[in-house]
Amino acid sequence: MSILGGGIFKGMGVTLRNFVGSYFRKERLTTNDYSWRPENKLPQSIGDYPKEEGEQLSDTTTVNHYSRNFPMLLHDTGEPMDTIRCVACRICERECPPQCIYIEKSTEKKEDADGKPQFYPAKFDIDVSVCMSCQICVEVCPFDAIVMNSQFELSTPDRFGGLLVRRDDLLKSNDYYHKIHPQEAASRDQKMADEKAAKEAKKKAAAEKVKAAAEAKAAAAEAANESKKDTE
Amino acid sequence: MTLAAPNYELLHQEGLETSLLEISMGPHHPSTHGVFRMDVKLDGETVVDLKPVFGYLHRNHEKLAENMTYLSSMPFTDRLDYFNSMTNNWAYALAAEKLIEVEVPERAEYLRVIMAELTRLVNHVTLVGFFMNDLGALGTPLMYAFREREKILDLFEQASGARMMCNYFRFGGLRNDVPEGWLDRTREVVDRFPAFLDEYERLLCENEIILSRTQGVGNLSRELAVNAGITGPMLRASGVNYDLRKVDAYGIYDRFKFRVPYTDGDTGDCYDRFMIRMLEMRESVAILKQALADIPEGDIIGKVSKVFKPKPAEVYGRIEGPKGELGFYLIADGTTKPYRYRVRPPSLINLTVLRDMCLGGQIADAVIILGSIDIVLGEVDR
């Protein structure tokens, strides 16, 4: 260091460079430029973003493939309550860290999408003012019935009832899930199909085993009968 | 430890009646980094006594965790030190993995290191910005720091779905793989980071105002630092070569070539603590470059049963967090919930020497000494 204040002037040079540079290079800007976004409406899903090539990095990406806000319940194609995946096993209610889920199990069974009689949630409420968007419920669900929604425009004038989301409002179709999280939804569907196939294969193997055992038993009985005959 | 004697002569000067002034700084003082209070006793502008008062942000983290399953407290660890959710997750996952036998896949180990080092960059760059803010450099350094931090937080968001409350680590691996193209974007950010550091050093490190405000202020001797259990950059600034990444070599840190910056321990002042962080960022970039070059393809999570029910055991998992040694102490009793859950927060333990560093100094220096400790009240109070 030679002159007093030299370090300060050096620093001033840096700020000057950043000031001038911010007009030419976007990464020198200390704020984000939102002017390219739709004027009257905030984007709701990844499809709404008019993204340019390589745009993603320098802008805040509020909606992406893994974005999570609050949970939603999934149903397959058809009437929501006829094809609901949730069977009210209440694992998510137990595991939820801030305890924001409330479930009441139905008293009678109803056929699900596969035609199998299942219980269903008579009540399924999520208090989104308590929910902390941690995604634990999604991970513990054995039926892939609950996933994260990415909708974030949820403001309401009623802070108690308005933020308590009921079952029918939580229900969303699998197609909607494919729209907001394409990669995740595809891999989840694949996983479910694999599990189903494995289950069926297991069932088939078990049935064959039972059949083989029965046959063997019958053969043994026959042999015993014959030996009995021989002794007679 | 020696305490500076208060200048009581002033009290008895002829014709001038003075007394000590008690000030309660905080809990909403802008320089206390959150809801934190310092009861300061002043003689003029000299600090005669200082008592840190905390607990305003107590959220019962440990007791809550004892009443829920092991996995459920993972999102709560994000909220300990909310700048470094990734490393908090790692420390907890590391402790829980000691309870069960699980092998973390190679790719997950690499991603863990990448996430932890990115977190260290985020933490140190933010700290330097806030430290300058405390010094009175309002705006510019902090805005530059936040600009760079935002680029890394974008990466976190793309990988985990959240900027700050990532909740990304799981026992035995990670929650999900990073999206396509993420590693390339990370490489881009990491490659550009040293240029920013050069610029940042040009902006700050020779500035005469910073030099005169920080050098020789808040000295912490090596003996006191070790005796008080100080860890992290603050300990290394006091001249102790101690870094858990080298000592424990947890994860796969033994595979990377990096240096641990530490001083000769002559001063251990605020400037040392500031510079150590600047140097550490360079080493983090070096680790990141190696990890990004070597990362293999493969699984992201090991074989862990869905119900986490470990056998009775006592474990302590610790990592070198950006602020110091972050440890989780767990006692399992064979159920799905921990019997005892304890966090060793680096912020709280580093804060204990605040009084010793501030005594005899100016009240304005107390602010920057607190800033150089690098505390986050979410972790201090838990």
Image (spheres, rainbow, N blue to C red):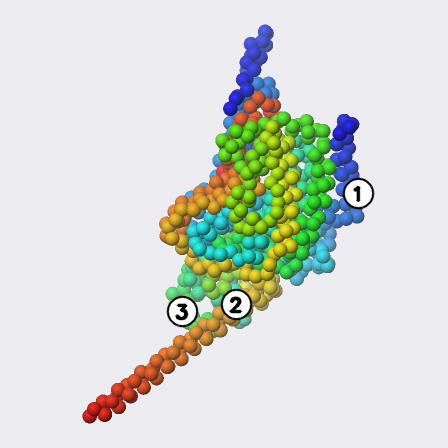
- Foreground residue among A195 and A41: A195
Chain letter of disc 1 in the image = A
Q: Residue furthest top?
A: B14
Give the residue type that dot 1 points to: Val
Task: Tell me: residue B272, above or below residue A232.
Answer: above
Spatial separation of the CA atoms under disc 1 and disc 3: 69 Å
Task: Tell me: residue A222, above or below residue B105.
Answer: below
Disc marking residue B346: none
Residue sitting at 53 percent across and 58 percent down?
B105
Q: Secondary structure at mark 3?
A: loop
Residue sitting at 51 percent across and 52 percent down?
A131
Chain letter of disc 2 in the image = A
Task: Tell me: residue A57, above or below residue A221.
Answer: above
Residue sitting at 29 percent across and 88 percent down?
A222
Spatial separation of the CA atoms under disc 1 and disc 2: 52 Å
Earlier in the chain: of badge 1 and badge 2, it is 1
In the image, residue B312 lies at what x, y percent? 37, 50
Is residue A151 visible from the viewing direction of this image?
A: no
Give the residue type that dot 2 points to: Lys
Disc marking residue A109: 3
In the image, residue B274 lies at what x, y percent? 63, 35
Q: Residue furthest left?
A: A232
The residue pinned by badge 2 equals A191
Spatial separation of the CA atoms under disc 3 and disc 2: 26 Å
In the image, residue A199 lies at what x, y percent? 45, 72
